[in-house]
Amino acid sequence: MVKNNIELDVKVKCIEEGKTQAQVAKEIDTTRAYVNRVIKRNESVVNNTFVKMLEALGYDIELHYVKREG
């Protein structure tokens, strides 16, 4: 199981960086609607087979975000 609330995480990171989802979408050459769909469906962010493999091994997944330098 992915422990993170990816939708909330992205919204918080947008606020921290002073950007909207629309601005992020433009930067990655996609639509705001697509960005919104991706973050609302956690299973599309982390490969479902990967999640199942780790669950079978007795693990949950927690994403950790690290700000890039420069």
Image (tube, grey):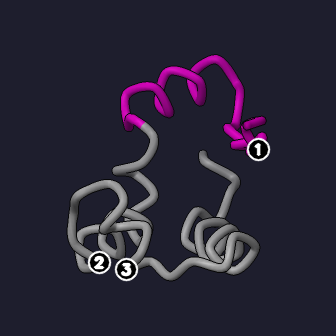
The residue under the point 66% across, 66% down is 9
Is the residue 50 above or below the residue 45 in the image? above
Badge 3 density bin: few <14, some 14–19, many ≥20, Cα 10 Å: some
Q: Amino acid at mark 3?
A: Ala
Q: Is residue 70 left or right of residue 25?
A: right
Which residue corresponds to mark 3?
22
Q: Position of residue 26 (x, y in %)?
A: 30, 67
Which of the pair 13/43 is nearer the observer?
13
Could you tell me the amino acid type at mark 1?
Lys
Residue 25: quarter of image: bottom left
Mark nearer the N terminus (2 vs 3): 3
Q: Secondary structure at mark 3?
A: helix
The verdict on residue 53 being magenta is: yes
Q: Residue 40, how many percent across, how many down?
A: 41, 72
| Residue name at image x 66 percent, y 79 percent | 18
Q: Are marks 2 and 3 in contact (CB under 8 Å)?
A: yes
Q: Which residues are magenta?
A: 47-70
Give left or right: position of 2 versus 3: left
The question of residue 61 being in magenta is answered with yes
User: Where does label 2 land, which residue?
Assistant: 32
Please name whichever residue, 13 or 58, is drawn nearer the observer in this view of the structure.
Answer: 13
Residue 39, image x, y percentages: 43, 66
